[in-house]
Image: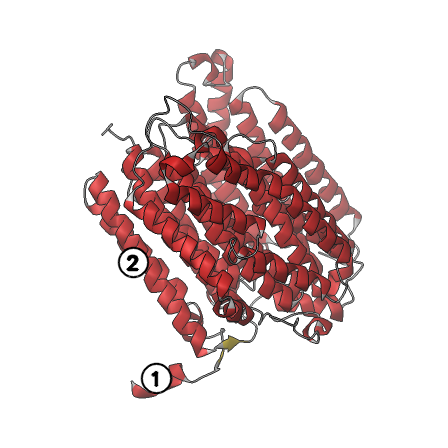
Amino acid sequence: MPQSPGLFYQVHFYLFGLLAIASALAFVTRKSPVAAALWLVSVMFNLAALYVMMDAHFVGAIQVLVYAGAIMVVFLFVVMLLNLGHPDELSDIRGRWGRLAAGGVGLALLAQIMVLARTRFAPELQVPANPVFGGPPDRGAVGTVAQPLFTEHLLAFELTSILLLAAIVGAVAIGKRRTAP
Amino acid sequence: MTALVAQVAAPSRILNLARPGELSLAIAPDLVLCGGAMLLLLYAAWRPESVAHQRRVGVGAMAVALATLVAVVLVSFLGWSSSGGPVAVDGFRWASDVIFLLAAIVAIGLAMDYNAREGITAPESHVLILFATVGMMIMAAARDLMVLFLGIETMSVAVYVLVGMNRRSARSAEGALKYFLLGAFSTAFLLYGIALVYGATGSTNLSVIGGRISALSLLESPMLLVGVALLFVGFGFKVAAAPFHMWAPDVYEGAPTPITAWMAAAVKAAAFAAFLRLLIEAFGHLYMAWHDALWWLAAITMFVGNLVALQQRNLKRMLAYSSIGHTGFLLVAATSATPQAAGAFLFYLLAYTLATMGAFAVIMALGSGEQPRENVEDFHGLWNERPGLAVAMTVFMLAMLGFPIFGGMGFFAKWYVLQAALDAVAPQTRLAVMLVLATTISAGYYLHVVMVMFMKPRPEMAPPLPAPGQMARAVIVATVVLLLAFGVFPDPAVRWARSGTQLVPAMPAAAAIPAPAGQ
């Protein structure tokens, strides 16, 4: 974070901060679980933007990948499975026009990715070899995170596996269907 | 090879925890327990579930815990120490580990009987007790907030499941869900507190935090103070201190009785051990800032726990509130925040663990699958029907009350806490008076149980009591003998508790206090 954040920084800080708080409020006030979960995704994205503004690019990327990506997909999946009896609540997209618009946006995004993949950029626009953290060039952002993870915080890293094992065993022990003796 | 053995066995060696090899030596007993638990898990899943298999896994779990206990005692005699690093290698850690492992062995023994009686065939329950014990041992050792947090979570996750293990009981499910939600809630407080403390000091290591607080003169830093306050709330939930105790009675009542006994003893002890290390090693310089908060927490907890316990008819609920009262007594020791208080705290914890586990074992021995027999009325005239159980229950009640001679080491436990409170840097005279008053209140319900067992007639038409299971009988006899033996010859227990006073205080003044006479 710069010593005296400029106006540009401040505007974005308040923008993402307020958006995160508003999304969090919407998340706890929505009646439909699907809508609530999607608001939570919005909270996660805004938090990721705040992390990036604090120069924690790696945490921001992980936030999007793990929380907004993996965990929320599982969450929505569970909500939708629980809602199997009410098919009208399954989808927020209603009507023919909604479907067409959604399909159009999807196609547009696909086209954008294909165009970007084929374009050659000027060298000034290309990302340098190690854009983040400015660490030694051979290690990169992940290396800078991995170094303390496997030295200073080795014990915490290993303990996490015990915690996960205990959680899995517990979940199976509680959830397993048992025949009456 | 011989060189390696000689190097390992060298007395009072200072381990360099930055090297993975020496870190593994520092957590050797924890590794024994982890490895044993994982092998046992494999064995548990190998065969189809049955009552006999559950018993076999239980015996295996007791053997693993016993092996770990031997490892802890061996390592503690080596007299290793460490400088910095994520885990502490000191007497306090080994002394706490002894309590956790003893409690785990007793709990697994009781659970074997209970599971057989209630038709719970899941062998995982014993393995989960071992995993939770791993978490507790890590909590007692942690000198790093991240390691501490992972220890707390490993313990809590396993305990959430164990509370809900009896799936045919709606109360058990209710207790598990309540405990899970409130546990997650308190974890959030804890984590937020850790984040703020890290933000203020730039480190998660307890000794570095302690050093930076004085070096950077952070005594007035709002971020640090808010972080410490949030940590207090988080730990307040974990140890069930009033006003954060609301979950305890419901969870203790709903959980299977062996798990209740184990939660009241070991889970609470582990949270306390971690809390005490945090207070002394990291926040010693902030003593003036948190002293008042802890003082009020101790005072309120003592009275709320003991006053509400007076009105309970269900013994499991009564013991739950009584355990809240004991939390208050232990907080008195924590408020003193001296290494001597750590010794008194360990001694109290041992006495309390023995008495609590014994009392719950008696409750379990009286019940049967359809009839839990947890109310005070079920104890009427117990002396006429099962004199042995009645006498044992009397010893446990008197030990919790702190009665001399017949209460065994319970009396000395209260005595040492009082002594530590009065000999502290800032003598806690008013807290000591309150402790005595609260103990007097607690006599109201402890002695009531004793009275109905001996003086009330057994109700007519009462169905005959079941014979206590083998393990329950063994546990009751062992706890009574230990309580009385340490009451007559407290020296071994005192020496053990004194070995636990080697904490590294951040506050140099605390180290200069002379040891209380008589300890």
Query: Circle 1 sits on which residue?
Result: B4
Residue B182: quarter of image: top right
Q: Disc 2 to disc 1, how far (Cα)?
A: 28 Å
Between A85 and B506, which is closer to the camera in this rendering?
Answer: B506
Question: Does B102 appear above or below B157?
Answer: below
Between B156 and A145, which is closer to the camera in this rendering?
Answer: B156
The x, y position of residue B23, in whole percent, is: 44, 71
Position of the C terminus of chain B, as image quadrant, is bottom right
The answer to whether residue B37 shows anywhere in this view is: yes
- Tag 2: residue type? Ala
Chain letter of disc 1 in the image: B
- Residue neighbourhood size for the residue with mark 2, other residues' Cα within 10 Å, grouped as few (<14), some (14–19), many (≥20): some
- Residue neighbourhood size for the residue with mark 1, other residues' Cα within 10 Å, grouped as few (<14), some (14–19), many (≥20): few
Residue B512: quarter of image: bottom right
Question: Does A68 appear above or below B41?
Answer: above
Chain letter of disc 2 in the image: B
Residue at image position (27%, 31%) is A178
Query: Circle 2 sits on which residue?
Result: B63
The answer to whether residue A139 shows anywhere in this view is: no
- Tag 1: residue type? Leu
Secondary structure under the numbered disc 2 in the rendered image: helix
